[in-house]
Amino acid sequence: MDSNNEQQFKIILGSSSVARKQILAEMGYDFTTMSADIDEKAIREEKPEDLVMVLAKAKADAILKKLQDAGTPENTTLLIAADTVVVYEGMIREKPSSKEEARQFLNDYSGGHAATVSSVLVTNLSTGFRKGDCDKVEIYFHDIPESAIDKLIEEGIVLYVAGGLIIEHPLILPYVKEVVGETDSVMGLPKALTRRLIDDVL
């Protein structure tokens, strides 16, 4: 897409995530945001791929309910919902429940590795057609010094992200050894997948 003037459709990003907003803006799209307000902890699935897909659907459905009162959109409007979890040694990790848990998570990643599984679900509100898919990224870490972990926990941002995992943060970036996949996927919205799904539902 060359310029925003050419965007023939509206986008609603069903997320209050700063990182997702940033990524969608980087992709050159104009959009508005709405948050879903669902109880994510009430939704359980064994497989990370199933969990993130079910959560994205639950978010999309919650927003659709809010929008239904407004009637059918006049223009083509796409709703993008997404979810990300961290997988460590086969276990699904969501946002840390405490500073202690965040510290435990970060200590685990030190000198080790984790993966993120992200889902994207795009719904064409004009036709009702929706399509979703998942993206997985592997992240390998050098040893993370205790001082860096202390600073991260003190700052608090790690308490609000899946698995307490932030790889783009200046305190963590020097200790990221290798990322197998796209950084934007780790941050919660894989660009290539999002673009493909947008094209698919239009």
Image (cartoon, rainbow, N blue to C red):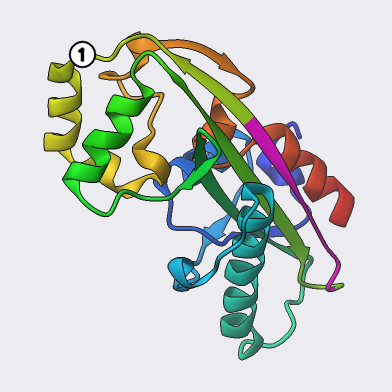
Dividing the picture into quadrants, the one containing residue 8 is bottom right
Does residue 106 appear left or right of residue 116 in this picture?
Answer: left
State the count of labels.
1
Magenta stretch contains residue 3: no
Does residue 67 appear left or right of residue 124 in this picture?
Answer: left
Residue, x 35% and y 11% (percent of image)? 175
Does residue 169 appear left or right of residue 152 in this picture?
Answer: right
Residue, x 88% and y 50% (percent of image)? 200
The residue indicated by pointer 1 is: 145
Q: Main secondary structure of the magenta part?
A: strand
Q: Quadrant of the C terminus?
A: bottom right
Name which residue type carries label 1: Pro
Dividing the picture into quadrants, the one containing residue 161 is top left
Q: Is residue 61 visible?
A: yes
Magenta stretch contains residue 133: yes
Dividing the picture into quadrants, the one containing residue 124 is bottom right
Residue, x 44% and y 67% (percent of image)? 41
Q: Residues within 10 Å of mark 1 (few under 14, many from 20)?
A: some
- Specify start and end residues of the magenta stretch as a single range: 128-136
